[in-house]
Image (cartoon, grey):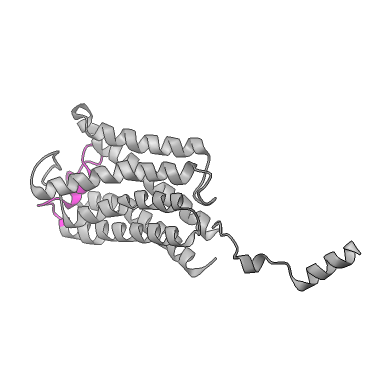
């Protein structure tokens, strides 16, 4: 395994660790916070007790590490333009976390509000729509590397979970459980990152050997000539 592949895997696993631990720890530190009904971004909203810590020690590293994972993975798979496009789509997850760090939501993370809130909402939608599409493309296409592929049904299921959870977050009747829907979508996306990273560590990158490395050696040519005689 080459160094860039190790770096990609380390970035992916670290991103998932930040994504899972930030809401858990910050939620425990914020009295009255409800994981079931409140968005993750509410931990970093304007006026939250630990907003700056959550945004710049939680959301920011999650976003940067996710972007590093997608960039390094796309650059070192040696695969098709479809793979690179899949990682471009999936990078929306990282951009959304960066937006959450620099454009915090208004109290309660409403669907409308300040300019900052509107930017926050736009990147949130991008995370789930583009991220879910990237998951489907990378996980279910035969032209992508083996380490991103799995059973096509699982890729479709993962994307369906992300899309369905995002749609449910927007329905007023589901407001009491909208936090659970968001956590389900984020967990699906970052579990995919963990699986891909583990496969990278296991040496699962597909590479096409350079033409020079596939030329027969002088010894093999001589053996073929002798056998022909």
Q: Quadrant of the C terminus?
A: bottom right
Give the quarter of the image for residue 129.
top left
Q: Which residues are magenta?
A: 32-51
Q: Residue at x 27, y 33 (%)?
A: 167
Q: Is residue 17 left or right of residue 101?
A: right
User: Is residue 25 placed above or below 209 in the rendered structure?
Assistant: above
Which residue sits furthest bottom? Answer: 218
Q: Residue at x 46, y 67 (%)?
A: 4
User: Is residue 79 placed above or below 159 in the rendered structure?
Assistant: below
Q: Nearer the viewer, residue 186 or 217?
A: 217
Q: Nearer the viewer, residue 24 or 150?
A: 150
Q: Is residue 42 visible?
A: no
Q: Position of residue 38 (x, y in %)?
A: 21, 40
Q: Is residue 196 left or right of residue 109?
A: right
Which residue sits furthest left? Answer: 114
Q: Is residue 140 left or right of residue 212?
A: left
Give the quarter of the image for residue 174.
top left
Residue 93 lies in the magenta stretch: no
Magenta: predominant secondary structure element?
A: loop
Q: Residue at x 79, y 68 (%)?
A: 220
Q: Position of residue 149 (x, y in %)?
A: 51, 46
Q: Is residue 196 visible?
A: yes
Q: Residue at x 22, y 33 (%)?
A: 170
Q: Position of residue 100 (x, y in %)?
A: 21, 52
Q: Quadrant of the N terminus?
A: bottom right
Residue 38 lies in the magenta stretch: yes
């Amino acid at each position: 395994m080459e160094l860039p592949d190790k770096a990609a895997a380390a970035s992916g696993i670290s991103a998932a660790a930040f994504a899972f631990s930030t809401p858990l720890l910050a939620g425990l530190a914020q009295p009255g916070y409800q994981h079931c009904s409140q968005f993750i971004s509410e931990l970093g909203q304007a006026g939250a007790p630990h907003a700056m810590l959550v945004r710049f020690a939680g959301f920011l590293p999650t976003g940067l590490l996710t972007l590093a994972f997608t960039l390094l993975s796309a650059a070192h798979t040696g695969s098709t333009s479809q793979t690179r496009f899949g990682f471009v789509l999936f990078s929306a997850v990282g951009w959304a976390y960066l937006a959450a760090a620099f454009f915090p939501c208004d109290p309660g993370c409403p669907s409308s509000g300040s300019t900052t809130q509107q930017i926050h909402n736009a990147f949130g939608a991008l995370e789930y729509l583009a991220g879910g599409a990237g998951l489907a493309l990378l996980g279910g296409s035969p032209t992508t590397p083996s380490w991103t592929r799995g059973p096509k049904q699982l890729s479709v299921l993962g994307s369906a979970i992300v899309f369905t959870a995002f749609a449910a977050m927007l329905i007023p009747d589901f407001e009491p459980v909208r936090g659970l829907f968001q956590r389900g979508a984020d967990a699906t996306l970052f579990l995919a990152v963990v699986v891909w990273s583990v496969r990278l560590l296991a040496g699962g990158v597909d590479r096409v050997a350079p033409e020079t490395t596939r030329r027969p050696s002088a010894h093999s040519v001589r053996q073929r000539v002798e056998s022909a005689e």
